[in-house]
Image: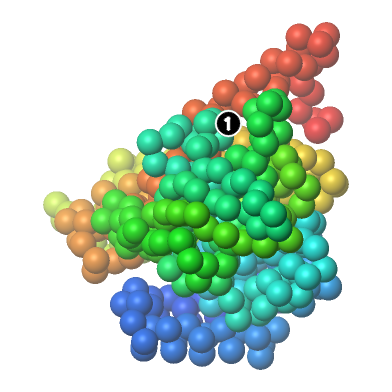
Amino acid sequence: MSFAVPDSVRPIRDAVQAFMTERVEPAEALLHEAGPEAASLLRELQAQAKKEGLWALGHPRELGGGGLPFLDYVYVNEVQGRSEFGQLALGTFTLQDSLMLRLHASPEQRERFLAPLVQAEIWPSFAMTEPNVSSSDPTQLQTTAVLDGDEWVINGHKWFTTGADRAAYTTVMCRTETDVAPHLAFSMILVPTDTPGYTIVRDTPVLGIDGGHCEVRYSDVRVPASNLLGPRGQGFVIAQQRLGPGRIFHCMRWLGQAQRAFDLMCRRLHERSAFGRPLADKQLMRQHVFDSYTEIQSARLLTLSAAEAIDRGEQARVEIGVAKVAGARMLHNVIDRAIQVYGAAGLTPDTPLDRMYRHARAGRVYDGPDEVHIDSVGRRILGEYAAGGNWEFGLR
């Protein structure tokens, strides 16, 4: 395995990087406004991406995407991740949901949701987390769905349903079974967001940022029985298949965010001086560069390793868990150092760092808090030794 960007990927990676730095990043201030002008600009960026062959590069070709393998997609997604708007402009924000529908959707569901999803004609959302419930233990989830004739009747309370305020539908994880093992009690149901009883309570701010993370109540929401996604009782299986690749997608994009913060930090060290010398001459500032380089490169190699394992057809739960924890910590640390180098300016919206920092902190919580992944990885590795084996890194 070579860690250099493959020659076959370099042209598309360079094109994506140019798209990000020349068009998406300069548009961030307006895109943050989230009004009609911002929506129009986003649609224009999406049209440009489609025209230039940069659209949905990680989606399978049969769905209308670029068909990049996971490993190749790391090299592209890490530059796309420089901006939070990259995945929106380049059509990859639907990838987790598209892969989930590809695996489990009925022909009718595929026609209704999958094709328009890949083209960003509709937006998806996913509802698993619930307030006042430790959702890192999803067996505690309380939202229920009861079959009444040929309809599911859903009642419950979800939050952090990202994008629900603009989504055409929400994939809802519900308790549908009784008298079974906890991990066989849940199912996934597709709920159009215009269904009566589906009520958005609020956009829940995350560290002061309104990002479409919606709180939603389900009050006697009725949808056809055919809206069941996959078999009954397989909600955990489907959720894991969705969340596993999703965690790697986060890790890929975090590399782009870290690269951007690293660039800002290093340039600032050359631009500013204190006590008669450039900041770049200060040994403690060079320590920031060293530590950031070490953490970025380590997280990058962990992400590449996990992507390679997925391409081999493995579940890669250890690799994914480690990459997710290390990547989230790395991103937080690198942005924190960049803010320190900028001083007071780093705390203001004059640079993208203040917003990046808040997003980075959230990364240690969503898609499973660090503690859950750490425990799971430790348990799996120790299980190898309990069974009389060991963990040989070079053979995995």
Is residue 297 shown to the viewer in this render? no
Q: Position of residue 27 (x, y in %)?
A: 40, 81
Q: Which residue is mark 1?
A: 139
Mark 1 lies on a secondary structure that is helix
Residue at the image position 59 percent from the left and 89 percent from the top: 47
Asked where in the image residue 199 lies, by quadrant, the reply is bottom left
User: Which of these two is toward me, 327 or 218?
Assistant: 218
Q: Position of residue 345 (x, y in %)?
A: 20, 61
Residue 256 left/right relative to 313 = left
Residue type at numbered disc 1: Thr
Establish if 253 lies above or below 310: below
Neighbour tally class for label 1: few under 14, some 14-19, many 20 plus, Cα within 10 Å: some
Residue at the image position 53 percent from the left and 46 percent from the top: 128
Residue 369 left/right relative to 359 = right
Residue at the image position 33 percent from the left and 60 percent from the top: 202
Quadrant of the image containing the C terminus? top right
- Colouring chosen for the image of the structure: rainbow
Residue 340 left/right relative to 156 = left
